[in-house]
């Protein structure tokens, strides 16, 4: 019974205001309430797949999956975020995370390609600086 009520609350919240739902997602992530944030994000994704905040919703879903150690789903969400918006505000961070995931899975060539794109498209970003450091670290330990 309680579960049904939660689903109805989610739907009402989504219909009322996409931006308010998005703010709840960000707040929940900030509060480390990942299960709630993920549930809200997935509901928003299903209800309003073309909403203007969808690239950011995909980003947050990637972040949540990273927290849970689910690199496969995190990678998918991050890639979706970039495909929804090439000029995504978190694009440099997403590219860095995709490179780290690739390194962690032994996909060095893919990681190097992502880092090269990151360096070219966002050369002055903090993510680009971290990418260079990360690349050296992974190459040094022979992964």
Image (cartoon, helix red, strand yellow):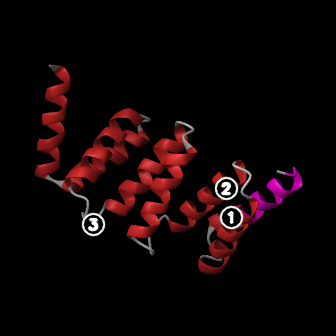
**Which of 94 and 71 lies nearest the eye of the viewer?**
71
- Residue that lies at the very extreme toward the top in this rendered image: 1
**Image-based side of 52 in relation to 125, left or right:** left
Residue 61 percent coordinates (x, y): 42, 48
User: Label 1, on which residue?
Assistant: 110
User: Label 2, on which residue?
Assistant: 102
Q: Are marks 1 and 3 in contact (CB under 8 Å)?
A: no
Does 47 appear above or below 69?
below
| Dot label at residue 52 | 3
Disc 1/disc 3 C-alpha distance (Å): 30 Å
Local packing at callout 1 (Cα closer than 10 Å; few below 14, some 14-19, many 20+) is some
**Magenta-highlighted residues:** 131-142
Q: Earlier in the sequence, mark 1 or mark 3?
A: 3
Quadrant into which the N terminus falls: top left
Residue 24 percent coordinates (x, y): 29, 44
**Image-based side of 37 in relation to 17, left or right:** right
Residue 111: image quadrant is bottom right
């Amino acid at each position: 019974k309680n579960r049904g009520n939660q689903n109805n609350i989610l739907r009402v919240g989504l219909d009322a205001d996409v931006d308010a739902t998005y703010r709840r997602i960000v707040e929940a992530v900030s509060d480390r309430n990942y299960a709630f944030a993920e549930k809200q994000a997935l509901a928003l994704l299903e209800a309003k797949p073309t909403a203007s905040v969808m690239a950011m919703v995909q980003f947050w879903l990637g972040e949540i999956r990273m927290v849970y150690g689910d690199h496969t789903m995190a990678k998918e969400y991050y890639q979706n975020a970039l495909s929804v918006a090439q000029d995504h505000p978190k694009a440099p961070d997403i590219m860095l995370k995709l490179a780290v995931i690739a390194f962690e899975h032994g996909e060095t060539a893919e990681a190097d390609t992502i880092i090269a794109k990151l360096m070219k498209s966002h050369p002055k970003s903090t993510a680009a600086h971290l990418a260079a450091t990360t690349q050296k670290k992974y190459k040094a330990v022979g992964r």
